[in-house]
């Protein structure tokens, strides 16, 4: 009689592909709605994606969370350029690529938490560069949040503008607004 050990390792299962497919369907629906200029809401996204609301909520908390997770993943999966101009262009290119989504969740109709989280992501990305040049009397974390919130306050109307400046020229304008201690140190 063969004895089977209760501690024998079970074969590993392949990851369930359904969450990734659901997430991809949601993101594709957001893109299609954006291209159509349609309203972005959980209802419109689930209808466009042919998903249930519970499927949406299994992946995201709300529409603002879609934008936050996209931006967070972008910064986690990519190396942000160390050159300030390239770093700002990196951010603006992402905002521009998902203009409808970011326009819908940032600013007037924004959920405060989504806007705050986007600001924190930008601040965290800029913190190393700011910490490297900050005078001793300036807290780098404070300066990073200050610059991130100011940049976001300029980016939101740029995103919503029908005749907006190019990524290149807008990035250059944002960098010109930096104080001398940042400009001279970068």
Image: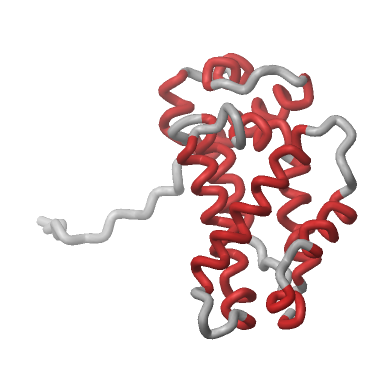
Given residues 30 and 131, the one toward you in this image is 131
Residue 39 in percent (x, y) is at: 65, 18
Q: Is residue 41 above or below residue 148?
A: above
Q: Is residue 22 above or below residue 89?
A: above
Seen from this angle, which residue lies furthest bottom? Answer: 136
Which of the image's four quarters has the C terminus?
bottom right
- Applied colour scheme: secondary structure
Q: Residue at x 76, y 62 (%)?
A: 177
Q: Is residue 52 above or below residue 77?
A: above
Q: Is residue 86 left or right of residue 79?
A: right
Residue 18 in percent (x, y) is at: 49, 34
Residue 163 falls in image quadrant: top right
Q: How many numbered callouts?
A: 0
Q: Is residue 84 left or right of residue 165?
A: left
Which of the image's four quarters has the N terminus?
bottom left
Residue 64 in percent (x, y) is at: 53, 35
Residue 57 falls in image quadrant: top left
Q: Is residue 12 left or right of residue 133?
A: left
Residue 104 in percent (x, y) is at: 64, 29
Given residues 86 and 1, the one toward you in this image is 86
Q: Is residue 37 left or right of residue 39?
A: right
Q: Residue at x 60, y 49 (%)?
A: 71
Q: Residue at x 45, y 48 (%)?
A: 14
Q: Residue at x 72, y 48 (%)?
A: 94
């Amino acid at each position: 009689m063969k004895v089977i050990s209760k501690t024998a390792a079970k074969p590993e299962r392949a990851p369930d592909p359904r969450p990734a497919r659901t997430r991809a369907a949601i993101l594709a629906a957001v893109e299609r709605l954006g291209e159509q200029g349609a309203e972005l809401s959980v209802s419109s996204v689930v209808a466009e994606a042919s998903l249930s609301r519970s499927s949406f909520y299994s992946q995201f908390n709300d529409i603002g969370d879609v934008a936050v997770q996209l931006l967070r993943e972008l910064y986690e999966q990519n190396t942000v350029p160390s050159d300030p101009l390239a770093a700002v262009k990196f951010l603006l290119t992402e905002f521009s690529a998902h203009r409808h989504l970011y326009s819908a969740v940032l600013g007037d109709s924004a959920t405060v938490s989504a806007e705050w989280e986007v600001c924190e992501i930008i601040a965290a990305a800029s913190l190393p560069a700011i910490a490297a040049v900050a005078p001793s009397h300036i807290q780098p974390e404070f300066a990073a949040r200050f610059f991130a919130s100011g940049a976001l306050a300029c980016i939101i109307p740029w995103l919503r503008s029908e005749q907006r400046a190019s990524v290149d020229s807008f990035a250059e304008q944002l960098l010109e607004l930096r104080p001398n201690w940042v400009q001279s140190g970068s």
